[in-house]
Image (cartoon, grey):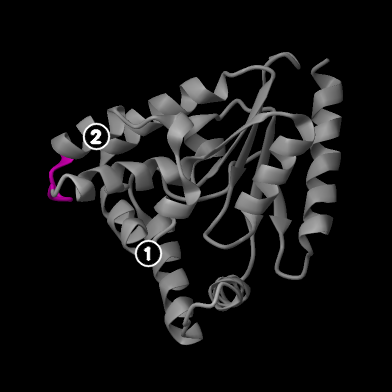
Amino acid sequence: MTSRHFTIAIDGPAAAGKGTLSRRIAETYDFHHLDTGLTYRATAKALLDAGLTLDDEAVAEKMAREVELAGLDRDILSKHEIGEAASKIAVMPAVRRALVEAQRRFSKKAPGTVLDGRDIGTVVCPSAPVKLYVTASPEVRAKRRYDEIRGKGGIADFDAIFEDVKRRDERDMGRADSPLKPAEDAHLLDTSEMSIEAAFQAAKSIIDAALSRNT
């Protein structure tokens, strides 16, 4: 792999800060960015919009293969009901295969790409020269989600959010197909007591060192 085609794989549980970090890294290096979780949400939204069931794997796979990665709208796809639907289809092997194929195609864009999700370093881009695993304690992640909702004027129940975070972790880490876990050669960034700036600087030093080795 050369610097003309450089992939950064970022994994981690919900609300650990990997999305914010990924977008900043992509902007800093002028790389393409993909939040792979949105591809599952886009598939789920397509099924919901069409009034289709969420338990037909063949239909879900067809929708997954029609997802346009260039047209993913974070604001629309971040709605709670879409996330719940996405979690149901994300366990389907055929859906995962279809979306992983699309994500791998995206990862080959020049000059480089930043992909964040749950299985980037382990499944989607196992040969990426930089792999980061961004995590934080469930309590910290629940508090961040709580503050985010309240900050936007919404009503939030911390206990409910905390339980939801733990359920998502259990679902993501316990699934048979592509469970959430750090790649063996991933750099761990625990943001529980780390600012986004500190996390970015730590990531940047890792990326810069890898880029220098690949030039």
> Quarter-wise, where is residue 57 in the image?
top left
Q: Residue at x 82, y 41 (%)?
A: 204
Q: Is residue 173 above or below residue 139?
A: above
Q: Are marks 1 and 2 in contact (CB under 8 Å)?
A: no
Kindly state the secondary structure of the residue where label 2 is placed: helix
Residue 104: in sight, yes or no?
yes
Tell me which amino acid carries mark 2: Met
The percent position of residue 6, horizontal first and vertical second, equals: 69, 22
Q: Residue at x 45, y 46 (%)?
A: 37
The percent position of residue 185, horizontal first and vertical second, equals: 66, 38
Q: Residue furthest front?
A: 153
Q: Tag 2: Cα neighbours inside 10 Å, few (<14), some, or many (≥20)?
A: many
117 left or right, relative to 46: right
Quadrant containing the C terminus in the rendered view: top right
Q: Tag 1: Cα neighbours inside 10 Å, few (<14), some, or many (≥20)?
A: few
Q: Residue at x 41, y 64 (%)?
A: 168
- Identify the magenta region: 52-57
Please name whichever residue, 81 or 57, is drawn nearer the observer in this view of the structure: 81
Q: Is residue 101 magenta-colored?
A: no
The percent position of residue 67, horizontal first and vertical second, equals: 34, 32
| Residue on which disc 1 sits | 80
| Residue on which disc 2 sits | 63
